[in-house]
Image (cartoon, grey):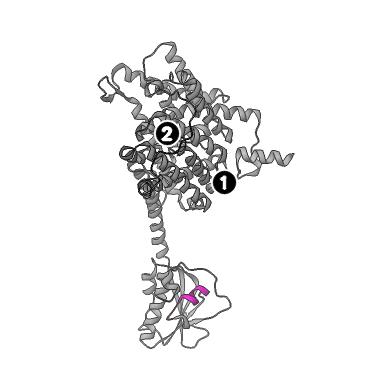
Amino acid sequence: MRSVQDRLNRFWFGNSINAANRQVMTKAQASTDLLSGFTVSLALVPEAVAFAFVAGLAPLAGLYAAFIVGLVTALTGGRPGMISGATGALAVVMVSLVASHGPQYLFATVVLMGLLQLLAGALRWGKFIRMVPHPVMLGFVNGLAIVIGIAQLEQFKTVDDNGVSGWLAGAQLYTTLALVVLTMLVIWLTPKLTKRVPAPLMAIGLVTGFVLAFDIHVPRVGDLASLAGGLPSFVLPDVPLSFETLQIILPYAIILAAIGLIESLLTLNLVGEMTEQRGGASQECLAQGTSNLVTGFFAGMGGCAMIGQSMINIKSGGRSRLAGISAALFLLSYILFAASYIELIPIAALTGVMFMVVIGTFAWTSLKTLRRVPRADALVTIAVTIVTVWQDLAIAVVVGVIMSALVYAWNAAKRINASVRPSQREAGALVYEINGPLFFGSITAFMALFKIEDDPDAVIIDFANSRVVDQSALQAIEDIAAKYDSVGKRVMLRHLSRDCHALLSRSGQLIVDSDDDPHYGIAADYGVQTGRL
């Protein structure tokens, strides 16, 4: 019986880093998760509707996606506490496809997107998220916080009777601002008074009651669109099953799958740091893929992890899968039964909640540490933040990883040097003890270490304190050996791995075998492996 309970707790809460802090499902925690899920579901509504509009779709396409993606990932995802749904990062990519080919092609794209994400999960590609450095994570968090904040500015716009969009003005603007500030104050004060009710839920309830009691005329959720609808229906996307269709949807599916996984895995890491959980990257890929595959067959726009709603959930006390499951089910209940009530909520209340999410998400400490960390890391953080706001998350992360890799390669290249001494074994020979990694970035410095004309007739190059990394390094060894040979001097190569023995074509016979030769692989291509350097 104990093992069954342990399995249930692992299902609800995932893997804790600290076994002593592993949680168990209690009535109090279940109550907290349900209230947190209810709060998250309210915050999901306006964003799902807004992102559907951005993509050129009907509101229900966003709501169905938020429900299905949220439910499937809550049940099967790699990180309990994460919230997934329709997101703006995906919506902006979908716009051109919907405009040029219509919603049915988008639904087919979402199905293919899900299959690609399932493939990534099956191949366990999620582990590569570990290659994202901390400065990139900081830039991602800060950039996404800014994006969320900018998105809320849309709530201060209105459309007149002629369909012209403009900013709120006069009394309506001041009233909306006052309600936003009131919402933020309630969220700030509630934890100081009670922790039984999630602060965002308390704020939404009080502000909505205040608006209804005094009949204050401000934009409400119902002004965005009607939320009423039925259960999502299974339907195959109405597109031709042809190679031409695949040519249209495949590029979009690849981009959407990549953006969805990058945002989901980065959010997974962020939530893991806050809840002391680990692992689950490949499982999250499978969950995201399954959710999008299902969503495409139910006329949903697809989705991925949502950092804003995830932060609302975590800060409201939601820790188990129950929070995400309840958020999805509450959202479905609004569509089926409670649309008229949810439509009464003032948008200002939800905007205030999201502004507090922005404040809580932004890594304010990074502003202080920018002066203390290496300049290259500070530049990476700033660049990722800017590109996230300017372009999108996927491009920003790729840019950040490339910048970090180049910085690492540059620093590693500067570490190579040589200790030169007479040989104790070979009379008259000179020993070069190479220190530091030998790879494409360090070969120029490596070649400059040797004084070929001044060296004696016998030279030993010892790689005991080095590591030959790639094809460029092998080529550099070949070249230096050839230069010594051209002036009639003998070279001996020591402490190279068996891979080097096999891959060095011209100078392989110069290697001196030792009992303490290292064992490591080399990143070499077909040309090296076949001796075609």
x and y percentages locating residue 134 in the rendered image:
46, 49
Spatial CA distance of label 1 from label 2 is 25 Å
Whether residue 355 is visible here, answered yes or no, is no
SS assignment at label 2: helix
Q: Residue at x 25, y 24 (%)?
A: 164
Write down the residue under mark 2.
358
Q: Is residue 75 left or right of residue 373?
A: right
Query: What kind of residue is marked 2?
Result: Val
Question: Based on the displayed image, in which of its 4 quarters is residue 34 positioned?
Answer: top right
Q: Could you classify mark 2 by the number of other residues whose Cα lies within 10 Å: few (under 14), some (14-19), or many (20 or more)?
A: many
Where does the C terminus fall, quadrant-wise?
bottom left
Any magenta on residue 139? no
Query: What kind of residue is marked 1?
Result: Arg
Considering depth in this image, is 519 or 61 the residue closer to the camera? 61
Whether residue 300 is visible here, answered yes or no, is yes
Write down the residue under mark 1.
278
x and y percentages locating residue 478 in the rendered image:
40, 78
Range covered by the magenta-colored residues:
496-505
SS assignment at label 1: loop
What kind of secondary structure does the magenta stretch mostly adopt?
helix
